[in-house]
Image (cartoon, grey):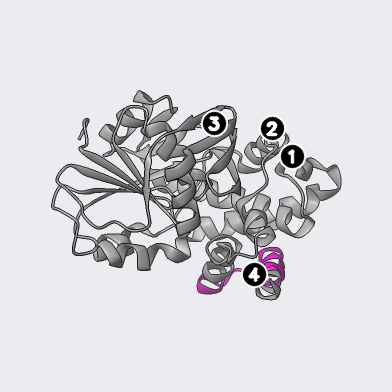
Amino acid sequence: MDHPKLIYILGSGAIGSIFGARLSEKYPVILIGRKNTVNSINRHGLKLKGLINKTYKLKAQEKITNIPQSTIIFLTTKVNDSRSALLHIKNLVKRDTVLVILQNGVNQEEEYKKILKCHVIRAVSQCGASSSEPGLIRFNGDSTTFVEKNGMEIAKILINVGFKAELVDNIKIKEWEKLIVNCVINGLGSILRVKNNQLADPGLKELKTDLINECLAVSKANGIIFTKNISKMIDDYIPLSANTNSTLQDLNRGKKTEIDYLNGEIVKLGKKYGINTPVNKTLYYLIKSLETNN
């Protein structure tokens, strides 16, 4: 589907807005979001600041009401909102509809395939972005978006609008890489209430090492074996990222976080495989407490 008739961005958070804005340069795009965001975008456009400084004129609405032939849907909701969002469009999808999962977490694909009888493609992005107000997105980091190997047309579409995209043989490796990065950055960064690059503090090295080792033990039990040094990858990445992690953004706005699908996922799988995860468990319950108090 090199030339989709329509692209829906299902989820108008920071990442969804970045993808929606850039895709709208060459494709017909409709952004799906909450009422205040939809109203702001329809009236004033979608503003990007940072790596791109531009206002994009694209259509926004609160729900998907029709899915024509040759439609691509980028799923960018929080993971905890996905099921209800997909059930709403279950009877609207066509046989040629393509759902591109562009979310945090791991192992969602099979559940989504059961809900929607359409083609599902997994993609993993490390773009850094934050939302300060409806219709205004801070674009902080433009990293490669990894797409599973049967998603060549999706990768071509992303490259066509300026994204760096790469096909990979095993998207599960990229899912887990991002999960472990998020367990460190979102877990520690949210408790300490700091930007990502402040986690380069040498005083945190031993704690980060223990946290990463727990994640690696769980990933190995889950059949994921890394050929790269994950600790070094994270150590190299953190100083370069001035972004505020998405969990801390949610806490600051009094919203429900995705921590159940980050450090909480490691804790859950650790129990399944009989692996102790004390650092992840501590971060998980502390953030759940902050979330509840919010």
Q: Amino acid at mark 4?
A: Asn
Q: Which residue is mark 1?
A: 197
Residue at 52 percent across and 44 percent down: it is: 135
CB-based contact (under 8 Å), mark 1 and mark 2: yes
Q: Earlier in the sequence, mark 1 or mark 2?
A: 1
Q: Which residue is mark 4?
A: 276
C-alpha gap between disc 4 and disc 1 = 28 Å
Q: Which residue is mark 3?
A: 142
- The residue segment tinted magenta is 271-287
Q: Residues within 10 Å of mark 4 (few under 14, many from 20)?
A: some
Q: Earlier in the sequence, mark 2 or mark 3?
A: 3
Q: Position of residue 260 (x, y in %)?
A: 55, 67
- SS category of the residue bearing label 4: loop
- SS category of the residue bearing label 2: helix
Q: Which residue is mark 2?
A: 240
Q: Nearer the viewer, mark 4 or mark 2?
A: 2
C-alpha gap between disc 2 and disc 3 = 12 Å
Is 284 within the magenta? Answer: yes
Q: Position of residue 256 (x, y in %)?
A: 58, 66
Q: Amino acid at mark 3?
A: Asp
C-alpha gap between disc 3 and disc 4 = 35 Å
C-alpha gap between disc 4 and disc 2 = 31 Å
Q: Amino acid at mark 1?
A: Asn
64 displayed left or right of 128: left
